[in-house]
Image (cartoon, rainbow, N blue to C red):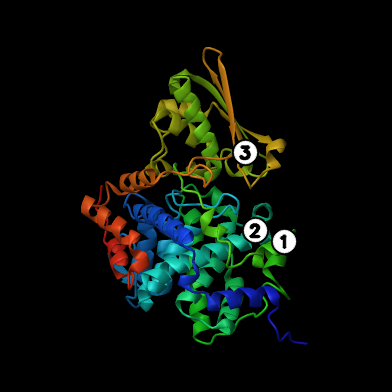
Amino acid sequence: MAVSTSGPLTSGWASYVSSFKAASIPEAVRARALQMILDGSGALLAAADPKISTGRLVAKFVSNLGGNADASIVGHGFKTSIVNAALANGTMGYACDYEPHHPEGILHPIAVMIPASLAVAEATGASGADFVAAVVLGCEIEYRLSMALGPVEQYNLGFHPSAVCGCFGATAAAAFLLKLDELQVTRAFGLAGCQASGLMAWESDETENSRPFQMGMAARNGVTAALLASQGFGGPIGIFDHGHTVFKAFSRKPDQTHMLKDLGTKFDGIMELAIKPYSSVSFLHPGLDLLLGIARRESLASEDVAAIKLRFPSSGTHCIDNNPLKSHCAQYILPVALSRAGLQVLDLFVDRRLADKEVARLSAAVEVIKDDDLDKGFPDAYETIVEVETKSGKKFSGKSGIARGYPEAPLSDAEIKAKFEHLLGALASPARIAALQADIKGLWASPNVSSYAALMSEAVRAQ
């Protein structure tokens, strides 16, 4: 017998999205969202650097596809269809691995939500406030679904939470901007479920192209789901409740209480985002803080270091232990940061071990150790122990689960501004950078996103 009702979880979310209003967002959440949009916009635009193959290739791909000039391609100076813009910009959104992330949910929601929301908002003429609201809504949906599925559960099954759950977040953001009714949102979520995907298989792709492509898929598929539903296209109506649900597909230990509890009153999807001080996988950030802190405190040069041990939760070590991706490799990221006075975005795309003998030496001296005791708090915290041994035999160590940039240890507004300006300094004029900062600050009061879109779309200058 056919099921005629969507079920409480699906209907609860569909009702919430279809009735969501920008005015319902508390002022503190709005302020936090604008901060995340600023930081995420910097990372997104930086990925248009011609030296980064990911942005260059995906922009060429959607340009060759053609399509109505409805939505801008960031940093490349042209427009294409809504769906293709979401794909290209979503891919660039995560390319630099420098955008805000959600530690607990193990997510990169801003990399998905800015591109998905911008494409639809630009094409529909939505207000700046609605664009910001769409980002907030999408982040909340993505976070709640990841927690309901269990981020570690998804990892253990080989799924990428940001891609799987990001598709649903992008669907919610696009559905809100398209003003879908409850039945349409129900179908849109069902269509999102039909498209939700993303394997951790990208860990073997040394080009770093398929890693951010997962965020592009999530943005594209979510926008596609909402657009199809807006045109009357049918879809599963109980994607969270009955039949072949997402919980059966992507988890073995789901906890659906995360779906509806405090929905509309808590916005942890945006409020608990962390801003990255380093362009690398977030799992390594506590370790980077510890290592660089020890070096500063003890006045250690990289040449003084004989060995580095990094103890990390057992559930996450597979992601950082000799990973072929430089962005996710402890044996690469720690030596580069220690020996080259920090990390630069291009360090992810140019292997410093090949030309820098000190980086190569230190890379061989880094050991990642699985620690079951640290696993108890993962992923609520990325508990990390760093042990440094010098050539003279001295030993130093530290432990932390919270990195700079987390809500518990936030970067200041001045630090976030400095990061934005440094990231774009070689790619855009000071006037453009200042105008973009001002435009983002004023988004809530803007009648549309055309100015923001134009500033983001303008082609970056070659270095």
Q: Is residue 216 above or below residue 346?
A: below
Q: Is residue 64 left or right of residue 179?
A: left
Q: Is residue 406 above or below residue 252?
A: above
Badge 3 vs badge 2, beta-carbon distance below 8 Å: no
| Residue at the image position 41 percent from the left and 44 percent from the top | 412
Q: CA distance from mark 1 to mark 3?
A: 23 Å
Residue 90 — which label?
A: none
Q: Amino acid at mark 1?
A: Asp
* Image spot of residue 204 (x, y percent): 55, 48
- Residue at 62%, 57% in the rendered image: 159
Residue under numbered circle 1: 255
Q: Which callout, 1 or 2, points at the residue further toward the start of the chain?
A: 2
Say which quarter of the image contains residue 456.
bottom left
The label on residue 147 is: 2
Q: Secondary structure at mark 2?
A: helix
Of labels 3 and 2, earlier in sequence is 2
Q: For mark 3, what is the residue?
A: 383
User: Badge 2: few (under 14), some or many (20 or more) residues near its Cα, within 10 Å?
Assistant: many
Q: Amino acid at mark 3?
A: Glu
Residues at circles 1 and 2 in contact by the CB criterion of under 8 Å: yes
Disc 3 element = loop
